[in-house]
Image (cartoon, grey):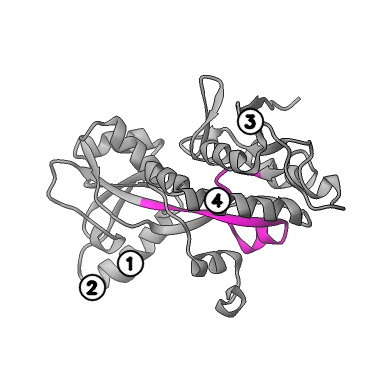
Amino acid sequence: MSRRARFTLPLLALPLLISAGAQADDATLQPQRLSIGSDLTYPPYTFLENGKPAGFDPAFMTLLGSHLKLEPQFLDTRFANLVMGVNARRFDVIASALYVTPERANQVAFLPYLKSGASLMVRADDSFRPQRPEDLCGKRIASIKGGSWIPKLASLSKDYCQANGKGSIDSREYPTSPEAAQALLAKAVDVQFEDAAVARITSDKLKGRVAISSDTLIYPVVIGLAVRKGNDVLLSELRQGFEAMKASGEYQTLLAQYNLAEPNAAEIAQALGQTPTAAQ
């Protein structure tokens, strides 16, 4: 039997208002509850802390649930099974740092709500303050092994740095992000290339020994909530709740806490594989 734990967060449980005539399977699987598929093994987005869901997505869904008058219920589900799970009606919505892609948009209905990407970290006592990948020519770069940006840095090193006589980017991969940070502190590398939210947590834990030098997300990706295609009632309710979070300022506060951003219309259209006209 696969491991799947259920966690309920203490929120006021009031019924979701659904238009007359809507079928039960057009909204939530259970009255007064919003069941959420989430892989709780991916800090700082989704993880367990003292046995309870924690991270950006649980915090976001807790706030969203309060606006919908629904009680969030997290079902710990491995990432590879999330799309299948929502389509099999095992839960209502996916909230688990799910990248928006055209291929996935053919399988589920997305509500894009987040933009992630990478940040650059340097030692706090170093005067070098890179802002963008082009600033890394001739530098030693640490990152977690298999990071999605590594092929991009290799292309940049060849096509931009070497082509312009600026020196190649020396990418060095480490098994974990903490090991990459230790290499930075030990001056084995000049910069750590890291997921933006992970970079924020790392800088906080190291208490000022490292600093995030970049002020915008690098190689951004759009993340979305996902529901079963055809569940238009729930998708509409989620969208309304999201707008209420933005109007209250709760959403912006949460983004700042995790060093993340809101995607714009053009970025969402690109993630969905739409043309600019289709996005308008």
| CB within 8 Å, label 3 to label 1 | no
The answer to which of marks 2 and 3 sits earlier in the sequence is: 3
Work out whether 72 lies above or below 98.
Answer: above
Give the number of the mark in front: 3 or 1: 3
Q: Which residue is at a point 40% across and 35% down the rendered structure image?
A: 176
The answer to which of marks 4 and 2 sits earlier in the sequence is: 2
Label 2 sits on residue: 164
| CB within 8 Å, label 2 to label 3 | no
The answer to which of marks 4 and 3 sits earlier in the sequence is: 3
Label 3 sits on residue: 12
Label 1 sits on residue: 158
Q: Which residue is at a point 39% across and 40% down the rendered structure image?
A: 198
What span is in magenta? 94-118
User: Which of the image's four quarters has the C terminus?
Assistant: bottom right
Number of the label disc, if any, that sits on residue 266: none
Kind of residue indicated by mark 3:
Leu
- Label 4 to label 3: alpha-carbon separation: 17 Å
Kind of residue indicated by mark 4:
Ala
